[in-house]
Image (cartoon, rainbow, N blue to C red):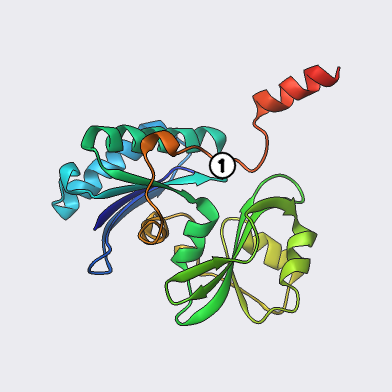
């Protein structure tokens, strides 16, 4: 099964193509950018397909980072995947951004991965996953939480690999002895982990895919504030 993964959840715009039957990453494109993802992601996809010699009709499943992450970025990626899946009549999957990050650094054999993304001061988006080969088991639900709460959850565990854009700062600040920092090359979203995670996920229809922000968007916050007032 050929899986095309698109990640627009953060400052990296990424696309990857993975053959699950051969367990082979066919190619990936990524760029750390300040430009709007809508300007970047589809050209990345087209270059990826051209470089690998794969046509859009050869893609069996589309995967997209469904959150957490940038509100606007998530909507751009999900809209792009919905459009391509509709047009091709192909399967699609919305994958947790944190789970995809964890798949990028999953250990050989068994181990635990903690994916951490910056939210706002003192808070992080966090996911904690146990791996046994390709089998991935969440140890908690993805959540927005204080940094100290996350550290309490992993305190006492055996060695934990930490990844994501919030990992380096958290380790530098708190210096937890049981936590290892993932290499920079796989610490940010690259699309590959997204594809590999999607290979073991249940497919969805495009209508079923929606963003999982893990906190209220600004419009919802404003509405609730107005109701209170």
Residue 27 drawn at (x, y percent) = 26, 58
| Of 215 and 161, the residue lying toward us | 215
Quadrant (top left/top right/bottom left/bottom right) for the N terminus: bottom left
Q: Can you see residue 40?
A: no
Residue drawn at the location 47% of the way across and 58% of the way down:
100
| Of 41 and 133, the residue lying toward us | 133
- Above or below, 27 against 91 in this view is below
Residue 225 drawn at (x, y percent) = 79, 22
72 sits left or right of 141 in the view = left
Instruction: Say which residue label 1 marks.
Output: 212
Specify the quadrant of the image occupied by residue 229. top right
| Of 39 and 218, the residue lying toward us | 218
Q: Can you see residue 48?
A: yes
Residue 222 drawn at (x, y percent) = 73, 22
Residue drawn at the location 78% of the way across and 67% of the way down:
152
Marker count (numbered): 1
- Above or below, 166 against 79 in this view is below
Residue drawn at the location 42% of the way across and 72% of the way down:
134
| Of 4 and 53, the residue lying toward us | 4
Q: Characterize the local packing of mark 1: few (<14), some (14-19) or many (20 or more) Cα atoms within 10 angstroms.
A: some
Residue 127 drawn at (x, y percent) = 61, 59
Disc 1, SS? loop
């Amino acid at each position: 099964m050929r899986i095309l993964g698109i990640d627009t959840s953060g400052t990296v715009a990424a696309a990857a193509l993975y053959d699950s039957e051969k367990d082979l990453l066919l190619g990936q494109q990524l760029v750390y950018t300040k430009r709007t993802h809508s300007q970047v992601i589809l050209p990345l996809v087209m270059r990826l397909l051209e470089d690998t010699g794969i046509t859009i009709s050869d893609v069996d499943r589309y995967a997209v980072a469904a959150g957490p992450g940038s509100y606007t970025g998530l909507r751009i990626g999900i809209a792009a995947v919905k459009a391509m899946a509709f047009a091709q009549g192909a399967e699609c999957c919305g994958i947790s951004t944190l789970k995809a990050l964890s798949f990028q650094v999953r250990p050989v054999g068994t181990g635990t991965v903690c994916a951490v993304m910056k939210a706002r001061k003192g808070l992080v988006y966090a996911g904690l996953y146990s791996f046994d080969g390709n089998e991935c088991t969440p140890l908690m639900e993805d959540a927005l939480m204080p940094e100290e709460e996350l550290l309490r959850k992993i305190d006492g565990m055996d060695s934990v690999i930490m990844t994501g854009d919030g990992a380096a700062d958290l380790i530098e600040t708190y210096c937890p002895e049981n936590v290892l920092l993932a290499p920079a090359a796989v610490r940010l979203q690259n699309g590959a982990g997204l594809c590999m995670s999607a290979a073991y996920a249940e497919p969805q229809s495009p209508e079923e895919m929606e963003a999982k922000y893990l906190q209220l968007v600004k419009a919802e916050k404003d509405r609730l504030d107005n109701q209170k007032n």
